[in-house]
Image (cartoon, grey):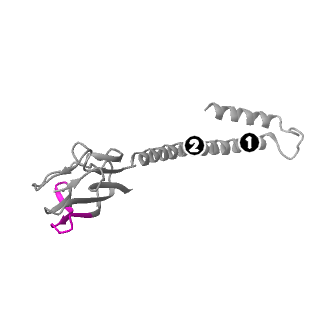
């Protein structure tokens, strides 16, 4: 408001020392005052418009900053291998959650190396892939579950070649397996885009 008062006082000061004031026969004082009052009203309207634009710009800036902050939080990706050290051979077994202990990356902390479960931190479409590797002495496979419902799976019967591997992948809106430090059995996922 100080700016508004200062602007009006400054404008009135300029109007009072207008060159040639009092020397014009064609305009009397009442006409001059009416014209200047109209000019002041227009200035006040323009000042209100400028103040509204400033408020609108501040609101847009706040929304933009909130969007940037949300996008920063939506960097989500992980990749992990089953074995953290040595070798793992699991099977034959009943259905159980495979816990991929050797975490290569876990941006956004969606994957838990304690439980083997990925929890989506934001709504979105996610790409998941997994691979399984095992010796040919047993049937080998794994399933990708979403809320206890099978989405995709891998399966490999024993063969004569010594070892078997398989893989699968899915995009989801949001396993008897062998592994060693070679990272044959992996589980990865990342956010494609937020919804």
Q: Earlier in the sequence, mark 1 or mark 2?
A: 1
- Judge by depth and name the residue closer to the eye, 33 or 84: 84
Q: Label 1 vs label 2: CA separation?
A: 26 Å
Quarter-wise, where is residue 174 in the image? bottom left
Q: Nearer the viewer, residue 166 or 118?
A: 166
Numbered disc 2: secondary structure? helix
Q: Residue at x 21, y 44 (%)?
A: 115
At label 2, counting other C-alpha atoms closer than 10 Å, the crowd grade (few under 14, some 14-19, many 20 or more) is few
Residue located 18% across and 61% down the image: 141
137 lies left or right of 49: left
Image location of residue 184, percent across then percent down = 28, 56
Q: Position of residue 152 (x, y in %)?
A: 22, 63
Q: Is residue 166 magenta?
A: yes
The residue labelled by disc 2 is 54
Is 98 rendered above or below residue 44?
Answer: below
Residue occupied by mark 1:
36
Q: Position of residue 127 (x, y in %)?
A: 32, 59
What residue is at 44 percent from the left and 44 percent from the top? 69
């Amino acid at each position: 408001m100080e700016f508004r008062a200062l602007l009006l006082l400054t404008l009135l000061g300029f109007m009072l020392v207008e060159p040639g004031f009092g020397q014009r026969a064609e305009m009397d004082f009442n006409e001059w005052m009416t014209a200047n009052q109209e000019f002041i009203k227009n200035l006040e309207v323009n000042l209100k418009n400028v103040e509204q634009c400033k408020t609108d710009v501040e609101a847009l800036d706040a929304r933009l900053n909130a969007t940037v902050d949300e996008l920063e939080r939506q960097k989500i990706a992980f990749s992990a291998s089953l074995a953290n050290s040595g070798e793992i051979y699991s099977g034959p077994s009943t259905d159980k959650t495979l816990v991929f202990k050797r975490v290569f990356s876990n941006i956004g902390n969606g994957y838990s190396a304690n439980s083997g479960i990925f929890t989506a931190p934001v709504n979105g479409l996610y790409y998941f892939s997994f691979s399984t590797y095992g010796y040919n002495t047993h049937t080998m496979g794994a399933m990708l579950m979403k809320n206890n419902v099978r989405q995709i799976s891998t399966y490999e019967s024993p063969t004569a070649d010594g070892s078997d591997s398989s893989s699968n992948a899915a995009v989801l809106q949001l396993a008897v397996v062998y592994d060693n430090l070679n990272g044959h059995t992996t589980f990865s996922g990342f956010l494609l885009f937020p919804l």
